[in-house]
Image: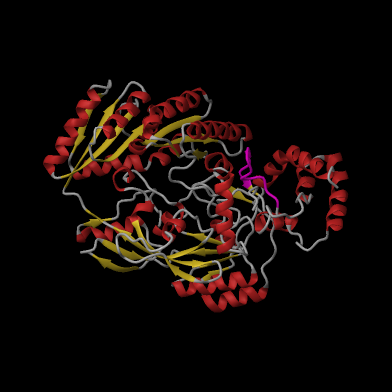
């Protein structure tokens, strides 16, 4: 038996290209689920006979259809507990993986479970295939899974969420929390089917404390809608990820945005959470006090847990005063290194900028094409300075001097509200500008972050490889905190282009890791970044994470197959 598994592994490796093509080309998910559905109680001898029967035709024909019929799962072990391996084998997330299609077998949910769920949710649930397909396929991501949710539920309260999770835990049905669907690393995939908990109906603002500068909200409210509500009070919530992101999802992925250089990430801006754990228990992570030394910091444990430990149902956020005045400046450079050097020099000078954004010449061209602009197509820096009118202008002049000392040119600034809004609008829509240059393409988006002193070096090394590639590649950076994105566009129907995009992504990530950086500064892990975590954090840290996951979610129903790499053993 020991010599049989290596044979299976080699066959799996040689066939996965054909299998992934077949799966990607299919639009009928239920047949794919039925092919991978097996009973977890099969004996070893039954599995061996099943493998033996499948092996001969596979060896003869070598086609994707036979590859899909193989049961390639190893015997479950301490590494394989839960949905990740006990119910289905997948390649995504293993070290060195280049696969993006998340495998996972599926067992039909019992009618009794659906009946109990309907009693809880009444009309706020659906079994409609189109709705399930929509929720099971990310809207802004190339990541895919062979399965989709079996049912979508729309809770209206924490009590609904608690009852839903208790029912799922009773029947051991997997759960995928769902927010604004703006995540790009496969966070909302449902590789094992189950229940998608769409929190879009939970969007109340429960309490605003103007004198304390905090607000209590439900997870389904978007950051843009929240700021519209806060504006008359002279307050705002400073984090600004992609349009459409919701507060619950922003907590789950520990997001940030262009204002993080001044205000920090989600980790620094959440005061308290209420979370429903995998067994249905409701916990709160703190009080409304601005600081506390009372026990473990459970809020920071939940922020960035990506739904693998519980479902966030209430968030208390730290707010900021709207600035009295702001100035937005732009300047151009001959090389991207010069631009990055200015960003570093600005931060070292102690100037309190609220944004420092870097865009390369390819991204500037995309902006011109998509928006009908005529901006110089060269590496460009965008700054924002806030405070009193005198202070903001003083900071602008200081940065202008730094720019002139680093080969910068065409330094301009605007103070008109409409002009400022227009400049930040084109920056926020940079990804869609890229898609306008390559209709029908998808984007592989990196979000590495390095120590600020290494930013120019990391971007320069990455840019050399990107410029040499045949693919359309752009660079955008939150240059004030060492975080940058490479947008690599590829034709999803062309496997060679996808592999080239993956090669570029690998290079950028490994370059960042070699500089004591991280594989993800703000997008999170999902399924796309799992394969890099052991190199970044070490196996000891991953085992600790898995122990926490096992303690809080022993049935592994909370967003299984995400965040923790499948090869980690405890």
How far from the left and from the top, in percent, is residue 96?
63, 37
Q: Does the magenta stretch include residue 224?
A: no
Residue extending furthest toward the bottom: 119
Coloration of the structure image: secondary structure
Residue 122 seen: no
Compared to residue 426, the image places residue 27 above or below, namely: below
Q: Does the magenta stretch include residue 95?
A: yes
Compared to residue 18, the image places residue 225 above or below, namely: below
**How many numbered marks have been drawn onto this rendered protein structure?**
0
Residue extending furthest toward the left: 390
Q: In which quarter of the image is residue 260?
A: top left
The residue sitting at 61% across, 61% down in the picture is 556
How far from the left and from the top, in percent, is residue 274?
42, 67
Q: Which is more toward the observer, 395 or 357?
A: 395
Residue 230 seen: yes
The residue sitting at 35% across, 65% down in the picture is 217
User: In the shown orientation, is residue 321 left or right of residue 441?
Assistant: left
User: In the shown orientation, is residue 49 left or right of residue 306?
Assistant: right
User: In the shown orientation, is residue 548 left or right of residue 63?
Assistant: left
How far from the left and from the top, in percent, is residue 458?
44, 29
The residue sitting at 32% across, 31% down in the picture is 344
Magenta residues, as a range? 89-101
Magenta span: chief secondary structure: loop
How far from the left and from the top, in percent, is residue 136?
57, 56
Q: Quadrant of residue 349?
A: top left
Compared to residue 218, the image places residue 374 above or below, namely: above
């Amino acid at each position: 038996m020991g010599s049989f598994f290596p044979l299976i592994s080699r066959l799996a490796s040689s066939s996965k290209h054909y299998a992934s093509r077949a799966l990607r080309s299919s639009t009928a998910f239920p047949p794919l689920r039925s092919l991978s559905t097996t009973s977890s109680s099969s004996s070893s001898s039954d599995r061996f006979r099943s493998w033996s029967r499948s092996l001969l035709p596979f060896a003869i024909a070598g086609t994707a259809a036979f590859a899909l019929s193989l049961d390639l799962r190893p015997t479950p072990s301490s590494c394989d507990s839960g949905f990740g391996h006990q119910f289905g084998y997948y390649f995504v997330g293993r070290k060195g993986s280049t696969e993006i299609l998340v495998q996972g077998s599926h067992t039909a949910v019992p009618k009794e479970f659906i009946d109990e769920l309907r009693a809880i949710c009444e009309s706020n649930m659906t079994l409609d295939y189109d709705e399930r397909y929509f929720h099971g396929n990310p809207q802004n991501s190339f990541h895919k899974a062979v399965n989709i949710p079996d049912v979508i539920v729309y809770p209206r309260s924490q009590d609904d969420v608690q009852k839903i999770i208790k029912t799922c835990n009773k029947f051991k049905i997997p759960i995928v929390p769902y927010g604004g669907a703006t995540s790009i690393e496969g966070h909302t995939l449902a590789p094992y089917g189950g229940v998608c908990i769409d929190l879009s109906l939970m969007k109340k603002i429960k309490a605003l404390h103007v004198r304390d500068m905090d607000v209590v909200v439900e997870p389904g409210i978007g950051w843009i809608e929240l700021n519209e509500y806060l504006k008359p009070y002279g307050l705002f919530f400073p984090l600004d990820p992609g349009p459409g992101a919701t507060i619950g999802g922003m907590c789950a992925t520990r997001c940030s945005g262009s204002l993080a250089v001044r205000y920090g990430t989600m980790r620094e801006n959440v005061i308290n959470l209420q979370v429903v754990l995998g067994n249905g228990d409701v916990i709160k992570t703190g009080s409304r006090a601005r600081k506390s030394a009372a026990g473990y910091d459970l809020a920071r444990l939940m922020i960035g847990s990506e739904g693998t430990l519980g479902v966030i149902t209430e968030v208390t956020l730290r707010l900021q005063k709207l600035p009295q005045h702001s100035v937005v400046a732009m300047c151009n450079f001959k090389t991207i290194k010069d631009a990055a050097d200015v960003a570093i020099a600005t931060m070292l000078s102690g100037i309190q900028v609220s944004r420092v954004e870097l865009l390369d010449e390819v991204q500037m061209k995309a902006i011109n094409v998509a928006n009908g602009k005529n901006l110089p197509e060269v590496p460009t820096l965008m700054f924002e300075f806030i405070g009193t009118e005198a202070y903001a202008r003083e900071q602008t002049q200081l940065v202008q001097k730094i720019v002139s000392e680093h080969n910068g040119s065409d330094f301009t600034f605007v103070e008109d509200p409409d002009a400022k809004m227009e400049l930040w609008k084109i920056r926020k829509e940079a990804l869609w500008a890229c898609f306008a240059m390559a209709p029908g393409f998808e984007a592989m988006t990196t979000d590495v972050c390095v120590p600020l002193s290494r930013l120019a070096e990391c971007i320069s090394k990455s840019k050399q490889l990107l410029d040499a590639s045949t693919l359309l590649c752009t660079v955008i950076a939150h240059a004030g905190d060492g975080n940058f994105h490479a947008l690599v566009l590829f034709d999803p129907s062309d496997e060679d282009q996808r592999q080239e995009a993956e090669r570029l992504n690998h290079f950028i990530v490994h370059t960042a890791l070699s500089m004591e950086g991280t594989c993800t500064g703000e997008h999170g892990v999902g399924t796309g970044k799992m394969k890099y975590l052991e190199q970044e954090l070490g196996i000891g840290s991953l085992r600790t994470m898995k122990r926490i996951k096992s303690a809080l979610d022993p049935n592994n129903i909370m967003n299984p197959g995400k965040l923790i790499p499948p090869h980690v053993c405890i």
